């Protein structure tokens, strides 16, 4: 008797007594943020379905390792800016024409633009974290490690330049 009352409709919705119970709207497609996630913290760290992982999605939470990598990237970006200012005070020149433009305006503007561009780039990498670059067969999240290594290399080079200039 239960089998007569409940059946699956052609579009996957469950029908009870001949009435469709589903609204037909996919709530995953809403694309809006709910304020309750700001104070409750949320639970999602990645998409559950393959289709969800193939598009850009904002999640409630991200992995702790991403937080530490991003914090280190931002730290070394600020250190890079400060060491660049120190090297310029010692007679060096900025080779990047875009950053040289902001450096000519004001050192604080230079620092803010450098931090802002680094932050924006890191956030883009974080949003596309689960995507795969097919030509390289590498996940986009792996690029965070490469960016961190690049900033660490630049930081080391600048410390070397400052140390050799003093000696």
Image: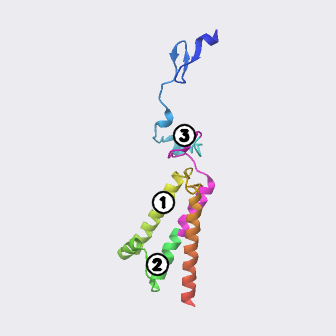
The correct choice, above or below, for 35 with respect to 1 in the image is below
The answer to which image quadrant residue 98 occupies is bottom left
Q: Nearer the viewer, mark 1 or mark 3?
A: 3
Disc 3 packing (10 Å; few <14; some 14–19; many ≥20) = few
Distance (Cα) linking label 1 and label 3: 25 Å
Disc 2 packing (10 Å; few <14; some 14–19; many ≥20) = some
Q: Which of 127 and 82 lies nearest the eye of the viewer?
A: 127
Looking at the image, can residue 72 be seen?
A: no
Q: Name the residue: 43% across, 81% down.
A: 93
Q: Which of 106 and 12 lies nearest the eye of the viewer?
A: 12
Looking at the image, can residue 26 be seen?
A: yes
The correct choice, above or below, for 41 with respect to 115 in the image is above
Task: Provide the residue designation for mark 1.
Answer: 121
Distance (Cα) linking label 2 and label 3: 46 Å
Sequence-wise, the earlier of marks 1 and 3 is: 3
Q: How is the image coloured?
A: rainbow
Sequence-wise, the earlier of marks 2 and 3 is: 3
Task: For mark 2, give the secondary structure.
Answer: helix
Q: Which mark is drawn over residue 21?
A: none
Q: Position of residue 74 (x, y in %)?
A: 53, 65
Q: Which mark is drawn over residue 51?
A: 3
Q: Which residues are magenta?
A: 48-76
Task: Provide the residue designation for mark 2.
Answer: 85
Q: Which of 130 and 132 lies nearest the eye of the viewer?
A: 132
Which part of the image, by quadrant, shows the C terminus?
bottom right
Task: For mark 1, give the secondary structure.
Answer: helix
Q: Nearer the viewer, mark 2 or mark 3?
A: 3
Q: Point out the residue furthest to the front here.
A: 135
Q: Which of 143 and 60 lies nearest the eye of the viewer?
A: 143
Which part of the image, by quadrant, shows the N terminus?
top right
Q: Name the residue: 35% across, 74% down.
A: 105
């Amino acid at each position: 008797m239960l089998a007569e009352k409940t059946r699956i409709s052609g579009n996957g919705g469950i029908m009870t007594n001949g009435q469709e119970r589903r609204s037909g709207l996919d709530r995953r497609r809403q694309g809006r943020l709910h304020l309750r996630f700001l104070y409750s913290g949320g639970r999602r760290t990645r998409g559950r379905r393959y289709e969800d992982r193939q598009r850009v999605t904002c999640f409630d939470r991200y992995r702790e390792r991403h937080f530490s990598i991003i914090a280190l990237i931002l730290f070394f970006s600020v250190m890079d800016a400060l060491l660049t200012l120190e090297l310029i005070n010692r007679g060096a020149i900025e080779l990047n024409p875009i950053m040289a433009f902001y450096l000519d305006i004001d050192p604080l503007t230079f620092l803010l633009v450098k931090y802002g561009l680094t932050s924006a780039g890191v956030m883009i990498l974080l949003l596309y974290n689960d995507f795969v670059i097919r030509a390289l067969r590498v996940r986009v999240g792996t690029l965070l490690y490469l960016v961190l290594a690049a900033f660490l290399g630049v930081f080391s080079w600048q410390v070397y330049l400052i140390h050799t200039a003093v000696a």
